[in-house]
Image: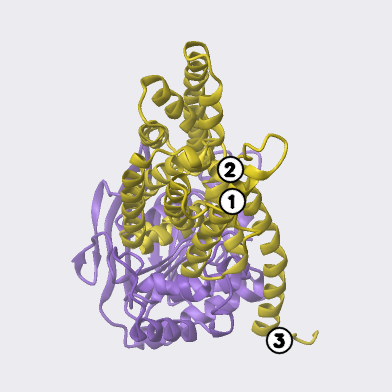
Chain colours: A purple, B yellow
Amino acid sequence: MTDAQQPIGQDILSVNGLGVRLGDRQVLDDVTVQVRAGEFTGLIGSNGAGKTTLFRVILGLTSASAGEVLIAGRPRSRRNPLIGYVPQKFSLDPDAPLRARDLVALGVDGHKFGPVRPSRERRAIVDEMLDAVGGREFADTRVGLLSGGEQQRVLIAHALASRPRLLLLDEPLANLDLRSASEVVALVAGIAREQRLAVLISAHEINPLLPVMDRIVYLAAGRAVQGRTEDVITSEVLSRLYGHHVDVLSVHGRILVVADVGPQAIDDGARAAAAHVQIIA
Amino acid sequence: MSALIAPGFFSSGPVHTALIVGTAVAVISGPLGVFTVIRGQAFAGEALGDIGTTGGAGAFLAGVGPVWGFLVINVLAAGLMELAGVQRQRGRDLATGIVLGAGLGLAALFLYLNTTVHNTTGAAVTILFGSVFSIAQSSVPIVVVLAVVVLMLMAVAARPLLLASASPELAAARGVPVRLVGFGYLLALALSVALCALTIGAILSTALLVGPAAAALRLSRRPGAAVVTASLLGVGAIWLGILLAYDSYDWPPHHQGWPVSFFVVTVVFAAYLLSGVVGERSRRRSRAHARPAVSAG
């Protein structure tokens, strides 16, 4: 692998010893994540592992009980223009009068109060972002009428419009068919390389990200392991994370994580591992 | 022309008042209605209209103009709905329903007192179904001022409100105060519905709020155009309604005129049906433009 030789820049995202309690539940515990400029990092974990919470803390929408989050070396703040965000949940009525182009324009100045002043500059940015995601052909179609893959492209263009240095994508592949998913992954990887963006993309399935992922953060039961994919996705590391023995198999270039869920294996680690494995396999 | 516009139309004082109030109300109903549909809060609008009955009936009992009753009760109801959790997608209808139920209980009492104390059902009909020709001229300034205030608020908050309506998650990530913007919208909605209630009656107010907006959404793809179209359709419906109502004084059975609200609501409904035909045709055309047929395989 040439990963180690790649000219990778400074840490854009630096999460150190992060802990989050929601109510009496420890959602994240001593989580450390670094993402550098131009680096594509996959955040892998099952539903409920704490992926969305981690994103919310990075965005400044949920407060941490321990640890720190630095964006480009500085403490994070709300409305940080350095962060572009694609949420997991997005649905818009097909009747809503919002074209793809309008949603991207809201990425430029949607947070600003005051009357709208359409300018040539604003329009140029919108066109540039739509071009970057290959979205020119549906620029004038209502967002609610677009397919899942097209909506993801528009959301990515929206996120890029503030010219961020860190791109957070929360489960962008969740509702896509295989082909759209791999198109979105290739698109994001290309943009990250060209614009030297730091990308953190969450998924409960590891395989669609394998071809482009520089590093991986594996999240289970609120704890995280980060490293190069081949160092993290091993039986030893994942068994330690789950607190229960799991096997890692490679079948036809796909990775399967398999847990022993015999009748004797009824501890929490086994349940967590089993719940996840059903999804990942 | 004279067959359509009955003599005396342009020189009648009540007609002037009706046209000014109706136009102001229809103009603000455009933006409010479009956002109400985008946000899926039509039920909140309907509830505010119904609750207006309580305010109107209370104002009649207290001997003040109905506009004050509508305004006070609607702002109060909007505050209660916010407290009860109307901003949460899931609790929204429940919060609205609870406040609506409580408000309508009072309306029942006030309308009952009005009929027994004043021995007339006229108040009830006016409050429920409106009577734009009987609006006091003294109400005109407050209506116009409030309409201008609402319009300015919508213009100032247009972008954050649009973003928060399209996706609260995206808006929050961009630093938009989503909750505050939502409450501001709810207050503007409460004021607009109060003015709608004054014009075409408390329980018909949603028709003017949602009807033109629903038609406009079928006709325009972009947010600005939808808002303008909705306002224009609303103004058209109000003008045509007032004109027909004025004409109807010559109509059977009693030569006393048909209710304006009936005409306004009917015109709005017709515009909605018509927009379906026109919208479908233009949609088919734009889709054919945007996506040339791809050959199979």
Q: CA distance from mark 1 to mark 3?
A: 43 Å
Q: Is residue B267 left or right of residue A11?
A: right
* Observer able to see residue A183: yes
Label 1, on which residue?
Answer: B241
Q: Nearer the viewer, mark 2 or mark 3?
A: 2
Query: Residue flagged by tag 2: what amino acid is it?
Result: Ser
Q: Chain of mark 1?
A: B
Nearer the observer, B37 or B207: B207
Q: Residue furthest left?
A: A74
Q: CA distance from mark 1 to mark 2?
A: 7 Å
Quadrant occupied by the N terminus of chain B: bottom right
Q: Which residue appears at 33% of the width and 78% of the height?
A: A163
Work out whether mark 2 precedes mark 3 in sequence or the reverse, and give the earlier one: 2
Please give the chain letter of the residue carrying mark 3.
B
Disc 1 to disc 3: CB gap under 8 Å: no
Q: Are marks 1 and 3 on the same chain?
A: yes
Q: Is residue A162 left or right of residue A134?
A: left
Between discs 1 and 3, the one toward the N terminus:
1
